[in-house]
Amino acid sequence: MTDRKRIVILGAGFGGLFCSLKLAAQPVDVILIDRNDFHTFQPLIYQVATGTLDAVTVGHPVRDLLHKHKNVTFHVAKVLDVDFGAREVHVSGMGPVSYDYLVIGLGSVANDFGIPGVADHAFPLYTLDDAVRLRSHVLLAFEAADKNPELIEDGELTFAIVGGGPTGIETAGAMVELIATSLAEDFPNLDMAQSRVVLIQRESMLLPPFDPKLQAYAEETLKDRGVDLRLNEAVTEVNSTHLVLDSGETIPARTVIWAGGLKSNPVVEKLDIDLVRGRIPVSPDLSIADHPEVFAVGDCAAVMSEDGERALPQLASVAKQAGEYVAGSIKRQLADKPVKPFHYSDRGIMATIGRRAAVIQMPGGHTITGTPAWAAWAGVHLALLSGAESRVTAVLDWSWSMFTHQHRSRIVLNRDEEEDQSS
């Protein structure tokens, strides 16, 4: 028996992982649970999908990060539900896991908004599995067109990306680069001018949270690089061979990449909580109403700005700071010290559009575009990557791509399975 408090953390994303690391070496027992054995650096998932980075660069083994932290136990298990009354978490393959404090950082899943066909035919881009699956699908599409060019007219080489936020524009920019460089050399008998990258955004501008100058820069840059932009258009149906817009237009496309929004993990939706736009509402100390021992962090939490007028964006920086704050808050509570409200240190927002093109909006309104923004974007993302090996590999891969215009990671794994799904 022990009087040490048990802290259970659900999810090894930025919020959960950094909370557990901050509690390492403390006189508490920490149990971290995630359905995968790796931490995913989500901001770079699109680079796995487009062949610039390997999955092992973006995904880092969680246990490797915990080697020196003996008070943290990690379990790979799927979270099934939470019993707030009994203070227990139910997971696959284990008995109930009791807790004194609970941190929910289960992240989000793609939101199809109930649009017919999205769940069955579109490719979400939120997890590492999503990225590897999409990369294989794209490569198989070019192989199919190379064997039968008549498929091109039916949309085999049309890649429709739905959503004009950072994920959408980053994927669009990377996709046109992949096609124009590596794939153009891999498939010399194909006319790459027949390949299309279409970016569909239901609003009148790209990157809604950004300054209008940056929105205009992103739009102009994508157009200059060959992306077919469709603003003020919404998708009403997705099929295996085409998608339909609210204007009535049908676009033949056998690849629809869904970057249209997120919703909470299904486990969160089962909790006895009134969600706010699909996210868990939290108090200023990030705890849940009526359950001061339960906290929510990351994409599944609706963390309000200090003026209370808006929820903070679903960014890695918000999740990381929230996770570290909760760890500090728990330590202060255990020491009978007062807890201050969570304060988010806004360090700006950024997005890359491709080689030597990016946008940055700093606190206070200062903006940066072009190569300086791209270099700053690369530096920030390198600093956030887990593990020195991943950082070195990313630098080498980015440098190789920069100077050779080649994408090293373009192989198809599980070919038979992928071909069965594509057929």
Image (cartoon, grey):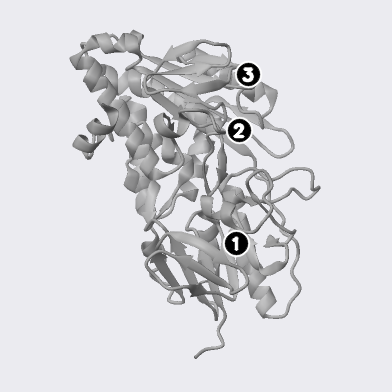
Q: Regarding mark 3 in the picture, which secondary structure is present there?
A: helix
Toward which corner of the image does residue 177 lie, by quadrant? top left
Label 1 vs 2, first from the N-terminus: 1
Q: Amino acid at mark 2?
A: Ile
State the separation of the CA atoms marked 2 and 3: 13 Å
Q: Amino acid at mark 1?
A: Glu
Q: Find disc 1 in the rendering and name its residue.
A: 324
State the separation of the CA atoms marked 1 and 2: 25 Å
**Which mark is drawn over residue 360?**
2
Give the residue at x 45% y 47%: 41
Q: Where's residue 282, x and y in %?
A: 70, 57
Contact? badges 2 and 3 (CB < 8 Å):
no
Label 1 vs 3, first from the N-terminus: 3
Toward which corner of the image does residue 283 lie, by quadrant? bottom right
Label 1 neighbourhood size at 10 Å, few (<14), some (14-19), many (20+)?
many
Q: Find disc 3 in the rendering and name its residue.
A: 216
Q: Nearer the viewer, residue 194 or 85?
A: 85
Q: Amino acid at mark 3?
A: Ala
Q: Residue furthest right?
A: 307
Asked whether the viewer can see residue 52, the reply is no
Figure quadrant of the C terminus: top left
Q: Regarding mark 1 in the picture, which secondary structure is present there?
A: helix
Q: Nearer the viewer, residue 20 or 379?
A: 20
Q: Is residue 137 left or right of residue 188?
A: right
Q: Is residue 249 left or right of residue 78?
A: right
